[in-house]
Image (tube, grey):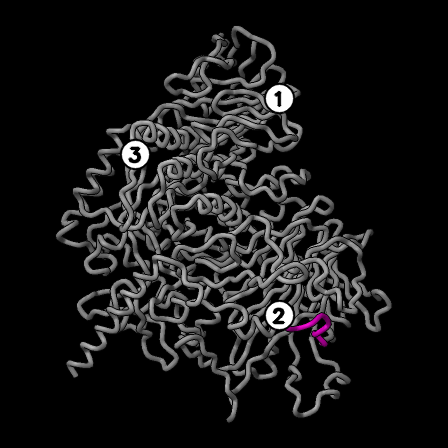
């Protein structure tokens, strides 16, 4: 017996060592491709018009248009008894219409046909209040399309749009009323296929093997696939997470050589490669199209199983006899999933921000972050001990570099047992956190989903006793291998278990935690070192007898949700949680932040981080970032500096590195480089009022903080494929530098507006590519017609900035006008939901700046008050040279003179500045140039 135990431990050590070695490079052979994934291979092999289903029994029922999808008798009769084609039982279809241009299509097995079990329908993603926006259909109209033998059924969708269910051939599409131009269509090419669950009979061999792993597949093949077309589209975007361009490249069809589909399957991937459709840590099956002729539309499939998506090159169906009833330009796509149901949403736009808002109305807007979370974060695997923490913290102050959060990775725990501390390295965790908090700083510790199988570990003991672990296919607690060794995984699909997990963050449960401690969820794909593709087997079982294959992509989402709820419970629902997650799914934005995972210290990884973060933003997750400098490897100094300069303008700003890398805190690279990195971090802090205002906009509307250029300039075709520059809100354009030794940069400035260099105030004409100097900093421009709020005094963290005065930077358009907003609340609580906030709009016109209240209602609880004033107003593009300005209602005159655009040493006065107007941000006032 002893020898068996020793052998088991040796095997486990070998597996762990193999995993640690594997982090040195990405091994393609460890992961399945489409040809090794039977459902993907089958779907890709199907030809247009494969689908023989027709829609019958079409009625309006309970406010929906419902139908049955059946195989016609004449087709069934043509199948001999040995045919591999199985005549399906009827499927049930429903079409629901919602406010603001949203169509929902659901297709599932017919429960009256007694399927062997209910297929998994993803819960807890669609907002409960979304159902209240349903438009109850009263009737439909019929028409015959293109001489069809059966009627099509038409329902009103939105102002100027209608939805059509075509019976034979079966198709669903959205079109413009009057013109008949299509927007989106489902099954126009007849590629729909729905493999129904079956009871295993003698002789059935449904097992699938990959490498050394076998998937039992107890209900047989259960995949779904269909074609989806986007009309008037020049490009399609979305479906993260992939390390590739913002616009999605064709993956199948003419001119495409041996490309894989875009894979959506949450995986723990080390040193992932760029320009690849390979799936990474998170999955959002939401695609947007954009084109100059139509605008923007979107399609979302709520499904948590593995998914593969092809973007089809023009002419992919050239050999087909199919004839579509429209000659509109379009992009066709093929969607394939291993399991689940069709629960899909069509978003008609027609503007980019309309689609963002429509998607947010289904899955939710981004949680409003605490102010500290929008600052700079410093992380490493691992800061060694309390002395190391103290030294790093003090060095930031010594070098006058602001930061807000210091992070601890897995080595801070007692043997990888989460919610514990290494008593030798971190003997006084509460005092350590309180010391940081005394300077306005926070700490984040890591908590992962794998639980060490140790009877002396209280978390494992409780989870095992209560049956809270995911089970293997035989019904036993699943035992996999991760950082602690032998591990089991909390079954977060069960709401009761999520509640139990949330309770573990109470101060009485998480010994050594304090109110300034927040959480990081890593490895929650879930990562299993000895599992197939470094994840959990597909036939593992969750609450409700749900197979892991059905919900894999949502596992990390539920873990993130439970952790966020834990911090919410800990503070009695008063303070906003901060939880960073590596895995994500639609709805993740409601619970916290994500990052792009284990990147590397390469120029190309810096470049690809921008489209990755832009893609996350347009698919709902605006609070995201990439590890500054790259997690793996040692960046050269120039790359590290450039990374800081770009990341300072991205939503989540964190430096992080692997424990095998050299230390890379900003002060370790010589005075000049320290100065450049300090400058980048300080710029972020000066812009925090603007960022925080944008986070509030995202929280209210779903429009992301950072945006592709085409989201702000939807008619400028030069922006559609540009993913090296991006917009921060509607006012700032940032052009990254992604190559060595760059002294200048070519920057495309969209539209007809004038753009102002953020460092010098120099004006540049839009609508063309400009060559600008970039040796010391990356090019950043403010768009004319905008007003940006700043805080220019340098502090050590956001806490010290609370009462600092503001600067307004006004960039005038050709009419001498500009506008902008400022949102302020207490930076931490939920009082803003009850009206405890300040929201101002600044308008400049005819030489007068006016502050107007935008708060929609009076506070129903404690009011939020601020005595902060505006100490400088910078005017860019002001053609006249006023000497003074009158402030009302104070009836006071202040000076207008030349001043620096940035408060940096060595910057000379160069721009018109209204000095010390000292008006309160919370009040109505006006300032007239004289």
Q: In the image, 284: left or right of 918?
A: right
Q: In this orientation, does residue 258 appear?
A: yes
Q: Which residues are magenta?
A: 43-52
- Tell me the residue that label 3 is attached to: 669
Q: Quadrant of the C terminus?
A: top right
Answer whether labels 1 and 3 touch (C-beta < 8 Å): no
Q: Which mark is residue 817?
A: 1
Kind of element beneath mark 3: loop
Q: Quadrant of the N terminus?
A: bottom left
Q: In this orientation, does residue 802 appear?
A: no
Q: CA distance from mark 2 to mark 3?
A: 51 Å
Q: Position of residue 879 (x, y in %)?
A: 61, 13
Question: How busy is the neighbourhood of tag 3: few (under 14 within 10 Å), some, or many (20 plus)?
Answer: some
- Tell me the residue that label 2 is attached to: 44
Q: Earlier in the sequence, mark 1 or mark 3?
A: 3
Q: In the image, 568: left or right of 659?
A: right
In the picture shown, does residue 730 fall above or below 43? above
């Amino acid at each position: 017996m002893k020898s068996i135990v020793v052998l088991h431990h040796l095997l486990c050590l070998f597996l762990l060592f193999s995993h640690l070695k594997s982090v040195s490079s990405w091994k393609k052979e460890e992961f399945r491709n489409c040809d090794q994934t039977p459902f993907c291979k089958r779907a890709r092999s199907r030809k247009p018009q494969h689908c023989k289903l027709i829609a019958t029994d079409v009625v309006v029922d309970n406010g929906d248009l419902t139908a049955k999808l059946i195989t016609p008798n004449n087709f069934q009769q043509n199948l001999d008894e040995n045919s591999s084609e199985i005549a399906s039982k009827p499927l049930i279809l429903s079409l629901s219409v919602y406010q603001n241009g949203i169509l929902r299509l659901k297709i599932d097995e017919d429960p009256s046909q007694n399927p062997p079990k209910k297929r998994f329908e993803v819960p807890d993603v669609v907002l409960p209040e979304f159902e209240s926006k349903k438009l109850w259909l009263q009737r439909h109209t019929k028409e015959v399309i293109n001489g069809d033998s059966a009627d099509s059924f038409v329902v009103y969708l939105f102002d100027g749009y209608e939805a059509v269910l075509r019976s034979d051939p079966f198709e669903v599409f959205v079109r413009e009323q009057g013109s008949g131009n299509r927007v989106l269509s489902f099954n126009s090419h007849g590629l729909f296929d729905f493999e129904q669950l079956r009871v295993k009979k003698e002789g059935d061999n449904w097992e699938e093997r990959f490498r050394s792993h076998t998937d039992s597949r107890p209900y047989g093949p259960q995949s779904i696939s269909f074609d989806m077309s986007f009309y008037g589209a020049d490009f399609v975007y979305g479906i993260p997470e992939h390390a590739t361009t913002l616009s999605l490249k064709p993956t199948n069809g003419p001119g495409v050589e041996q490309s894989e589909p875009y894979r959506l399957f949450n995986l723990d991937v080390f040193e992932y490669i760029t320009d690849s459709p390979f799936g990474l840590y998170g999955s959002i099956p939401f695609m947007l199209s954009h084109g100059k002729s139509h605008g923007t539309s979107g399609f979302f499939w709520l499904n948590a199983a593995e998914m593969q998506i092809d973007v089809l090159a023009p002419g992919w169906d050239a050999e087909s006899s199919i004839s579509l009833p429209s000659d509109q330009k379009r992009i066709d796509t093929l969607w394939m999933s291993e399991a689940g149901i069709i629960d899909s949403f069509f978003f008609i736009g027609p503007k980019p921000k309309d689609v963002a808002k429509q998607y947010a109305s289904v899955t939710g807007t981004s949680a409003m972050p605490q102010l500290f979370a929008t600052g700079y974060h410093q992380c490493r695997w691992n800061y060694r001990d309390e002395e190391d923490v103290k030294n790093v913290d003090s060095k930031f102050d010594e070098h006058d570099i602001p930061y807000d959060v210091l992070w601890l990775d897995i080595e801070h725990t007692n043997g990888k047992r989460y919610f514990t501390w290494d008593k030798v390295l971190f003997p006084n965790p509460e005092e350590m956190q309180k010391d940081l908090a005394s300077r306005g700083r926070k700490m984040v510790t890591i908590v992962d989903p794998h639980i060490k199988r140790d009877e002396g570990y209280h978390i494992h003991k409780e989870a095992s006793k209560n049956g809270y672990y995911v089970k293997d296919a035989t019904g036993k607690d699943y035992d996999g291998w991760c950082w602690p060794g032998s591990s089991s995984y909390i079954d977060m699909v069960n709401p009761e278990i999520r509640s139990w997990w949330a309770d573990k963050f109470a101060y009485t449960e998480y010994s050594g935690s304090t109110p300034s401690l927040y959480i990081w969820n890593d490895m929650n794909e879930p990562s299993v070192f000895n599992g197939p593709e470094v994840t959990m087997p597909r036939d593992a079982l969750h609450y409700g007898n749900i197979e892991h294959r059905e919900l894999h992509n949502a596992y990390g989402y539920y873990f993130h949700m439970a952790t966020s709820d834990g911090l919410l419970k800990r503070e009695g629902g008063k303070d906003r949680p901060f939880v960073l997650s590596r895995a994500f799914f639609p709805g993740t934005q409601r619970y916290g932040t994500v990052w792009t995972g284990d990147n590397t210290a390469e120029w190309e990884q810096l470049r690809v981080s921008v489209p990755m973060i832009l893609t996350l933003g347009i698919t709902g997750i605006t609070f995201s970032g990439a590890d500054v400098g790259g997690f793996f490897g040692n960046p050269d100094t120039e790359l590290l500096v450039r990374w800081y300069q770009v990341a300072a303008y991205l939503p989540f700003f964190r430096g992080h590195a692997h424990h095998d890398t050299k230390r890379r805190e900003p002060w370790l690279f010589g005075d000049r480089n320290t100065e450049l990195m300090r400058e980048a971090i300080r710029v972020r802090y000066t812009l925090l009022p603007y960022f925080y205002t944008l986070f509030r906009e995202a929280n209210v509307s779903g429009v992301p903080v950072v945006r592709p250029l085409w989201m702000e300039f939807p008619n400028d075709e030069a922006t559609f494929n540009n993913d090296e520059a991006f917009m921060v809100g509607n006012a700032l354009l940032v052009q990254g530098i992604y190559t060595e030794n760059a002294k200048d940069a070519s920057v495309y400035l969209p539209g007809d507006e004038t753009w102002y260099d953020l460092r010098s105030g120099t004006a540049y004409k839009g609508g063309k590519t400009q060559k600008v100097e970039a040796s010391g900093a990356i090019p950043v421009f403010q768009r004319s017609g905008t007003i940006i709020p700043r805080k220019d005094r340098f502090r050590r963290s956001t806490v010290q900035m609370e009462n600092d005065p503001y600067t307004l930077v006004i960039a005038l358009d050709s009419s001498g006008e500009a506008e902008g907003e400022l949102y302020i609340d207490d930076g931490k609580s939920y009082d803003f939901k009850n009206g405890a906030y300040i929201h101002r709009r600044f308008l400049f016109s005819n030489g007068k700046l006016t502050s107007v209240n935008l708060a929609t209602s009076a506070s129903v609880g404690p009011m939020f008050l601020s005595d902060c004033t505006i100490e400088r107003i910078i005017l860019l593009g002001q053609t006249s040279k006023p000497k003074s300005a009158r402030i009302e209602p104070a009836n006071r005159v202040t000076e207008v003179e030349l001043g620096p655009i940035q408060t940096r040493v060595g910057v000379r006065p160069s721009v018109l500045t209204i000095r010390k107007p000292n008006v309160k941000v919370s009040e109505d006032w006006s300032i007239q140039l004289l």
